Amino acid sequence: MLAGKIITVGITGGIAVFKAAQLVSSLKAGGAEVNVIMTRSAQEFVKPLTFQVLSGNSVRTDLFDEMRGAVQHIELATRPELLVVAPATANILGKVANGIADDLLSTVIMAASCPVLFCPAMNVNMYNNAVVQRNISSLRELGYEFVDPGTGRLACGVEGRGRLADLDQIMEKIESLLCYSKDMEGLTVMVTAGPTVEPIDPVRYITNRSTGKMGYAVAKAAAGRGAKTLLVSGPTALKPPGGVNFISVESALQMYEAVMEHYPAADVVVKTAAVADYRPKEVSSQKIKKRGGPLTLELVRNYDILAEMGKIKNKQVLVGFAAETTDLEKNSLLKVESKNLDFLVANDITQAGAGFGSDTNIVKFVYPGGDVKPMPLMDKTVLANRILDEALAVSQKRK
Ligand code: CTP
């Protein structure tokens, strides 16, 4: 998602400098052009060479070196699409909040024409200090972006808030700032994800291989683009993305109830969940003991949640998913039409790089009437945005 993006990373002097190495490396791996500026204190913790190797660009450290080379600090401030300061000390926050530009990084921030994201990291008492909190509040009011520090054991040995936020959180924020405008503001998006779990007895259940990755990626992307986002999810190992309302369910019946309750308010519904079509007719209240001979379980049909939504669709853009192993287009078209969908994301799970558990997908968008749009192999995050682009286009056409 970051391919071709130009990012300047400012590094100030705190023990979390070593974590900035991972950040620079991840940004670079994501395809961004990364330029690093280090303050003098930051260089006390880690040598510029580390960041030079990780970013593939020479590290800038001195305002006057830069000025001798044709006022490059202005270029450092105007060329990037995002300036990330990680870790951001109390000192840099104080300087920027009070208009001080006395070294290369503070000067570049002052002259920046792109969004500036601070990721503070410091001792808990410093972080809680009223002056620091006031500086953070005024910077927020001025439009500076923040990823708040986490809570835990700090380098100084005390427990509290002040450690640099997790890399995932910082990367999520960077992607949401860089990759999409808030083009879904005003829309309500409901996403379902993960498998459902159909109990047999207190110990056993029937489920499937869905990991939830695709649905969580769609929810995260929708929230990042400004939509009011609800994620209804079966059990997964994933953390719900920030900024998303989250409802956790287990069975298809629970998912049906949660989805139907929120359906009237939704503008877009993306139904990635792998809902069990059947559930055991009886759920034994006691653990079923083994006996001689085979055991027969009687299964009954669950609601087809998507089809139920299709029957009462009015303003909603309804997007379904289908995992197929044969006759992808034919089976998908049947589903689009029988469930009254706006389009279906059809996934041939026999292909390498597609389907359950992978971070990539190869899909085709199938539309009512039979139009088919094949998509190349793509990251689930990128695909999530393509799906939302398409849903947005349908929704705008309908207005
Ligand atoms: N779906 C649903 N409720 C169900 C079953 C599926 O809402 N009880 C939704 C899924 O979330 C997905 C789409 O319908 O968006 C999948 O369609 P479906 O016809 O169930 O696909 P398969 O399970 O692949 O169907 P089949 O077993 O008939 O191939």
Image: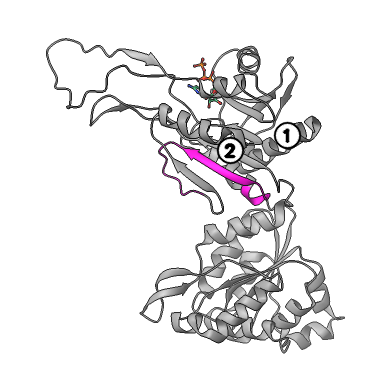
From the image, tell me which residue sits under label 2.
Answer: 190
Using the rendered image of the protein, determine whether residue 221 is visible from the camera's viewpoint: no
Q: Which residue is outermost to the left? A: 292
Determine whether label 1 and label 2 are within 8 Å by CB: no
Please, is residue 132 above or below residue 337 in the view? below
- Disc 2 marks a residue whose amino acid type is Met
Image quadrant holding the C terminus, namely: top right
Indicate left or right for 56 with 306 as reference: right
Q: 318 and 104: which one is in front?
A: 318
Report the number of discs.
Answer: 2
Q: Residue at x 57, y 61 (%)?
A: 170
Q: Is residue 364 above or below residue 56?
A: above
Q: Residue at x 66, y 54 (%)?
A: 176
Q: 10 Å neighbourhood of mark 2: few (<14), some, or many (≥20)?
A: many
Residue 214, percent across and down? Answer: 55, 37
Q: Which residue is labeled 1 in the image? A: 390
Q: Residue at x 53, y 41 (%)?
A: 231
Quarter holding residue 335? top right
* Alpha-carbon span between mark 1 and mark 2: 15 Å
* Span of residues in magenta: 223-240
